[in-house]
Structure formats: C-alpha cells, structure tokens
Amino acid sequence: MAYAIGILRYRRPLEQVQEHRAAHRAYISDLHDRRHRRRWRPLSSPCSAGVIFSVPDDGAQATLDALVAADPHVIGSVAQYEVLGWNPLFGEERLHT
C-alpha cells in the first residue's frame, strides 16, 4: 500500500468554493468507502484541507493523479492539490480503522 498526503488549497473566494462543497464532501466520503481515503480534516487555514490517501503500490502515482483530478473542487477550478508521498513510521495499522 502506498500513502500520500494531499493538501487542498482553495484558489477562488469561499463563496465560489461553497458552490462545490457538497459534491466535494460526497466525493471524499466515497473515497473512504472505496478505501482510498484514510483521514480528512480542514487545516487551520479556512482555505485549505488535508487528506491522507492510500492506493495500491502498483500504479500509485497514476491512481493518485486520477483521484485528485476527479475531485469536484478540482473539476470546478476552485481548488488545487499538492500531493506528497508519505511513509508512516508509526501507527500505520490505525489508518485502516
């Protein structure tokens, strides 16, 4: 299993982001159901959020790219992701609960 941290940053005024928020949250929930999302939380800035992704090792980067591209915030051009590979040293088993 490969892990990555996705940092989502809004690129439009919050009013425009709000128009896509329900679809974005449904998408994030679906990622959890499909076991691609381990954790998601808003960050301290009201204009960003963090996601921990998990994807199969085989084709990890292509899968991550596809997951990010399918986010309604990205499709609506109101946000963009920075995705960083992550190697959890402790507590990996808790990511799967």
Image: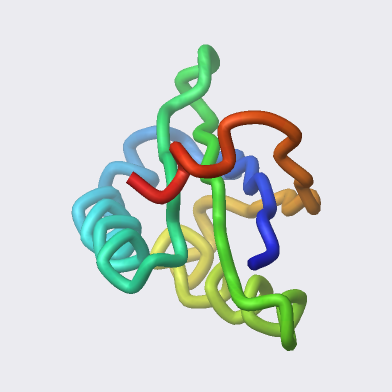
Q: Quadrant of the C terminus?
A: top left
Give x and y (percent) for residue 25.
26, 52
Quadrant in which residue 57 is drawn: bottom right
Give x and y (percent) for residue 3.
66, 56
Q: Residue at x 68, y 53 (%)?
A: 4
Q: Residue at x 41, y 31 (%)?
A: 41
Q: Quadrant of the N terminus?
A: bottom right
Give x and y (percent) for residue 76.
44, 66
Quadrant in which residue 7 is drawn: top right
Residue 21, above or below 64: above
Task: Judge left or right: residue 79 versus residue 2.
Answer: left
Residue 6, above or below 91: below
Task: Judge left or right: residue 84 versus residue 81.
Answer: right
Residue 69, above or below 90: below
Q: Residue furthest top?
A: 44
Q: Residue at x 56, y 61 (%)?
A: 54
| Tag count | 0
The residue closer to the viewer here, 79 or 30, is: 30
Task: Judge left or right: residue 2 versus residue 18.
Answer: right
Residue 10, above or below 41: below
Task: Judge left or right: residue 43 versus residue 62.
Answer: left
The scheme the figure's colours follow is rainbow
